[in-house]
Amino acid sequence: MDATRFADSIFGSAIREPGNKFGFTYYLPRPIPREIALSSSVINALSEADAALGHLQGLSALIADPSLLIGPYLRREALASSRIEGTQASLSDVFQAEIDAEARTDETAEVSRYLQATQQAYELAKTLPLTQRLILQVHETLLAGVRGSEKRPGEFRTSPVWVGHAGATPETAVFVPPLPHHLGDLLADWERFVNEDGRSLPALVHAALMHYQFETIHPFLDGNGRIGRLLINLLLMERGRLPLPLLYLSNYFETHREEYYERLQAVRERAEIDEWLEFFLRAVKAQAEDAVDRSRKLVRIREEYYEEAIRERSNLPRLVEIIVRNPFVTVKYIEQKLELTNQGARNLIKNAEKRGWLHSLGTRGRGGRELWYSPAIFEIIESPMSYRS
């Protein structure tokens, strides 16, 4: 790490401790500032992000069954957050892996672990504050059985790490996080900031600073980014800004991945906190607006299909609920979910196919199982965002 790139600021400094056994320069964060003077551009961005988040909050209160939307959004977030770390699965792969064991791969298993970790975090946060205890439990779920025990699931690192291109050394790395013996004090300060001291700040600024500091501390050998992004939603829910987990920033961070990393690094190197806050707030605004738009479309198509389905005495309304949550189905999957006979499940799918709700993707796998999907629903969930500045 090039120490000359790092200014000594209120956020930290590059140091090399005399006599330290590792013998290389690393970045040592200072306690998170409890007060931040917001520039006019940050205040404007905060106002816009707050308004967009308020619209999302209001929409979730009006939807009769908001859990309808959480599943698709969780999967988009899990996939985007995993892609930032290099996972190559598609959203179609993720949905198919959930209904067909033969479609599961190491890539989809990693996304599935993120989903499990996220759901576990939301449950834990109902009774626990955002503490190291919660983080360790969620980290263990995220990494257990996927990346291997050498990544120390559920444990803070006891060795140095560094961030850079493949084959980088501490000397050539872009960023070397604090050495392990600093983690205790840094995480204690992070915990106080999250649960006590940071509450005087606007919730979105609180979340942005929390995420920056967590990524800078880099407490794990692996999974820091995914855990740090997961914590954003938890903090906003704890602060009362979101009743349900419907805001997911990883899609924006993935789409703007280079800028995401640059903005975090610029705080460390040049104390450019305004630029990081503006980037974060733009992400909130864009994702909140996107969530409102997709939510309305999903609710609209669900109501359209449901209104048509209830006209006949069948399990068709129950099928609508299933395909809105996961637009991919097989006969076996519907047979199990709705406790139908094989022929009953097949007839139900064929009924939906005649109505144009489902299209066959042909047969696949050793058993030649046929796969169907809902193009209209999948398009709403999968389509790229249209970002507005």
Image: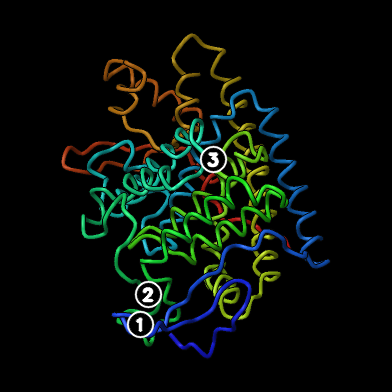
In the displayed orientation, state which residue is furthest to the left. Answer: 366
Establish if 304 lies above or below 229.
Answer: above
* SS under mark 3: helix
Give the residue pinned by disc 2.
162
Q: Which residue is mark 3?
A: 376
Image position, residue 122 (x, y; %): 48, 36
Among the two numbered marks 1 and 2 on one chain, the one whose residue lies closer to the N terminus: 2
Residue 100 placement (x, y as % from top left): 28, 38
The amino acid type found where label 2 is placed reads Trp
User: Quick one: 63 or 306, which is closer to the camera?
Assistant: 63
- Give the CA separation, mark 1 to mark 3: 49 Å
Of the two numbered discs 1 and 3 on the same chain, state the one appearing first in sequence. 1
Position of 267 compared to 275: left or right? left
* Disc 1 residue crowd, few under 14, some 14–19, many 20+, Cα 10 Å: many
Residue drawn at 65 percent across, 57 percent down: 386
How far apart are the alpha carbons under marks 2 and 3? Answer: 44 Å
Q: Residue furthest front?
A: 19
Circle 1 residue: 170
